[in-house]
Structures are given as structure tokens and as C-alpha cells.
Image: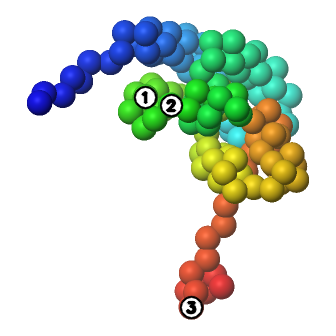
Amino acid sequence: MAWDFETDPEFQKDLDWIAEFIRTEVEPLDHVLGSPYDVTNPNNIKLVRPLQAKVKARKLWACHLGPELGGQGYGQVKLALMNEILGRSHFGPTVFGCQAPDTGNAEILAHYGTPEQKKKYLQPLLDNEIVSCFSMTEPQGGAD
């Protein structure tokens, strides 16, 4: 049995749009804005939010999450193809709602969070009102 490594033509249209959008509208942000994680910077809000609205309108927002959370529930292959393009810009993942560590934290909250945690943390992550972080410790390693 042979594997077909061709990208689905409909998804290829999305990838082509993403590549052009990143090149023409997102990459320029790298030259005029600071950190993509500064969601309170008025310049970030002014320039990033309209781009996020375009991504949401194309249904490409937070594609790592399921439709019940506004995403597409894409699997690893589609996400990898998207992230190959998004990684060309510091702001690419933020504009598409898939920046780390927010993606992993959103997935954990979506699957295991209480309704209160989802309201307090997940929804603001999805709305790009907050960014998240994580902390790791190593027993006996000085961080415990």
C-alpha cells in the first residue's frame, strides 16, 4: 500500500492564504512591535486584533482546539503544515491563536478544567485577553 503525501486541495487553499497573509500582513509586525505576548500594549491591540479577526473569519483560529471552542480540531499533520508557515513570524502564532504555552494550557483546561477554571482562564485565553505560563519543578534539584 502506498501513502499519498499530497495535501488535500481544500486545505492547500488555506495554506496558500496563510502563507500570503503571514508574508504581507503579519511579518511586518515583527519590525514595529515588541513582544507578541504583551496583550495589554495598545499598539499590539490596535494592530494584532484586526488580523486575528480576519483569521477567525476564515475559521483558522485556534485550530488545535475542537469546534466547541471555536477551533477546527485539526490533527498533527495539518497543524504541522500550518505551523511551518506561522513560525516565519514572531506574531504568526499569536495572530492565529496558537502560541505556546497557551495552546497546551488551553488543551489541558478544555479537557480537564472545571467550569469555573474554564470561565476564569480558558475563555480569556481564547479571547486573547491573557497569556499563560507554566512552572516546572525538579524534586531535589533546587526548584522544589
Q: Residue 59 appears at what percent x and percent y? A: 63, 17
59 up-or-down from 77: above or below: above
Secondary-structure class at tag 3: loop
Q: Residue 33 appears at what percent x and percent y? A: 70, 28
Foreground residue, 62 or 67?
67
Secondary-structure class at tag 1: helix
The residue under label 1 is 78
Foreground residue, 86 or 114?
114
49 up-or-down from 66: above or below: above
Q: Quadrant of the C terminus?
A: bottom right
Furthest residue in direction front, as rendered:
1
42 up-or-down from 137: above or below: above
> Which quadrant of the structure image shows residue 85?
top left
Q: Nearer the viewer, mark 1 or mark 3?
A: 1
> Which quadrant of the structure image shows residue 13?
top left
The answer to whether the residues at label 1 and label 3 have Cβ atoms under 8 Å apart is: no
Q: Quadrant of the N terminus?
A: top left
The residue lying at 69 percent from left, 18 percent from top is 56
Q: Residue 105 appears at what percent x and percent y? A: 66, 51
Q: Kindly identify the amino acid type of the residue bearing the numbered disc 3.
A: Gln
Q: Nearer the viewer, mark 3 or mark 2?
A: 2
The residue under label 3 is 140
144 up-or-down from 64: above or below: below
Secondary-structure class at tag 2: loop
Q: Residue 64 appears at what percent x and percent y? A: 56, 36
